[in-house]
Amino acid sequence: MRLILHSLEARRSTNTGRIAGLILENSSIDYHGRQDAPITDSFQPTPGYLPVLLYPDGAREISALANETLPIELIVPDGNWNQAARIGKRIHSLKDLEHVRLPALQPIHVLRRGGPDRLGTCEAIFRALGLLEGQEIELELLAQLAMFARSMLGERGRRTGREASKRNPWKSKNQSQAKSDLS
């Protein structure tokens, strides 16, 4: 997975794409929007992989790629909706990539509220990997995201303990129980 993170979003404590980049093996984070180091022309997909751009306007659902012979390089723009849309248009090597999307999913919203159909970047990445590599991986990654969210929100003094359990589908404090809560 390659995350293309907008430089303004990188500073936000609520940025979940960065979490995915830290959790996932074989992932990297490229920064877009920095005046001193633009990646507009230098970004190139990894040779030997089938690069696809995960974005809500994708013509094909990502699950259709599950039987591809080449390994998938999931490229994910990360920023607010406007920043993410511009990333796909401004980086020349991304313009011709196939855009793939997730199927309609009920967002979990462990960190913040968005529209009824909007997923945070980390949740979208983990769900995409679940469709490509299996639900067990997805559940493990989502449980890690939930633990991170509880910890972060607890440090901020918001939605902790009993109140968080009411809103959060992962009620337990350990990953194995959190995974079973999702099943």
Image: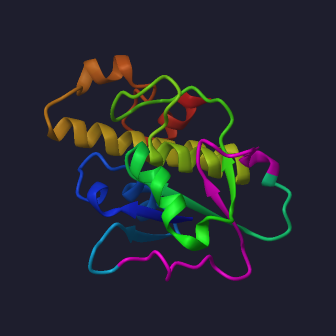
Magenta segment range?
38-64
Residue 60, how many percent across, how many down?
76, 45
Q: Does the stretch in magenta take in 74?
A: no
**Residue located at (49% from left, 32% from top):** 118
The tally of labels here is 0
- The overriding secondary structure of the stretch rendered in magenta is loop
- Is 174 positioned to the left or the right of 58 in the image? left
Location of the C terminus (image quadrant): top right
Residue 134, how many percent across, how many down?
71, 48
Residue closest to the eye, 11 or 162? 11
Location of the N terminus (image quadrant): bottom right
**Residue located at (80% from left, 54% from top):** 66
In the rendered image, which quarter is residue 95 located in? Answer: bottom right
Q: Is residue 26 visible?
A: no
- In the rendered image, the vertical position of residue 83 relative to residue 46, given as above or below: above
Residue 21, how many percent across, how many down?
44, 63
Q: Does the stretch in magenta take in 43?
A: yes
- Is 161 positioned to the left or the right of 6 in the image? left
Residue 40, how many percent across, how many down?
46, 75
In the rendered image, which quarter is residue 73 located in? Answer: bottom right
Q: Is residue 88 visible?
A: yes
- In the rendered image, the vertical position of residue 70 relative to residue 19, given as above or below: below
**Residue located at (67% from left, 43% from top):** 135
